[in-house]
Image (spheres, helix red, strand yellow):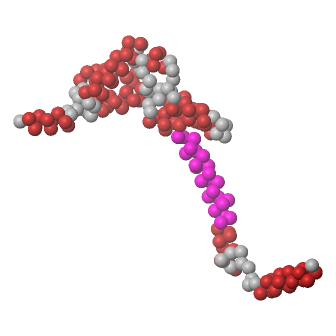
Amino acid sequence: MNRRRAQSVALAATSIALSPAAHASFLSGDTLDSVATFMAWFIVFVVPVAVVGIFLVIHVIPEKIAERNHHPQQHAIKTLCFLSLVFGGMLWPLAWLWAFTRPVGFRMAYGTEKHENYFIEMGEKARRGELGELELDHLREELAEMAARGPLPGKLRELPAILAQARAKPEAGGAAKAGGAA
């Protein structure tokens, strides 16, 4: 047993003696110091700014989703996103869920499930003649339903008159069929 131990010690000593020097980095001297200094400054100043920026961008996502989907309560969702920033992100999941859901009684109370900005955008498209006949009819019906439930909001009061004058855009398929039949 002692002989075997002596051989192990001799082998280990030989390995240590013959091994080349270990280097922890491919850089050396002043280059190593310069790279380490740059990395320290980068980690101290740039990384926190990037983390805060990413945190802010992520907390705005529910607000942008609510705007894109014309959520009727998008201002409340925007407020919840701001409060989530103040409270360190604790309310963000609620804002996320709220942005993807529709309020249950909103349509019954107001006659629509969309924010008034949707109707303003669609009114501008109707004025320019960019809406098809079905879209125009649907918009007129939705505004009539809203007006039946109560007075329209101030921004939407002139929209029924605009829609009454609006003409649907000509369908591309109809012109091709008419040209082909002649």
Q: Tell me if residue 154 can be seen.
A: yes
| The quadrant where residue 151 appears | top left
Q: Residue at x 22, y 32 (%)?
A: 169
Position above or below: 131 against 47: above
Position above or below: 104 against 117: above
Q: In the rendered view of the protein, which quadrant contains the C terminus?
A: top left
Q: Return the x and y of residue 56 as percentages of the image width and height.
A: 58, 45
Q: Is residue 148 left or right of residue 81?
A: left
Q: Return the x and y of residue 94 as percentages of the image width and height.
A: 60, 32
Position above or below: 13 against 107: below
Q: Residue at x 41, y 29 (%)?
A: 117
- Stretch of the chain drawn in magenta: 39-61
Q: Tell me if residue 75 can be seen.
A: no
| The quadrant where residue 177 appears | top left
Position above or below: 177 against 161: below
Q: Observer-nearest residue: 45 or 138? A: 138
* Residue 42 is one of the magenta-drawn residues: yes
Q: Return the x and y of residue 53 as percentages of the image width and height.
A: 58, 49
Q: How many marks?
A: 0
Q: Residue at x 80, y 83 (%)?
A: 16
Q: Is residue 48 left or right of residue 181?
A: right
Q: Observer-nearest residue: 31 or 170? A: 170
Please identify the residue farthest to the front as the structure is shown.
1
* Residue 128 is one of the magenta-drawn residues: no
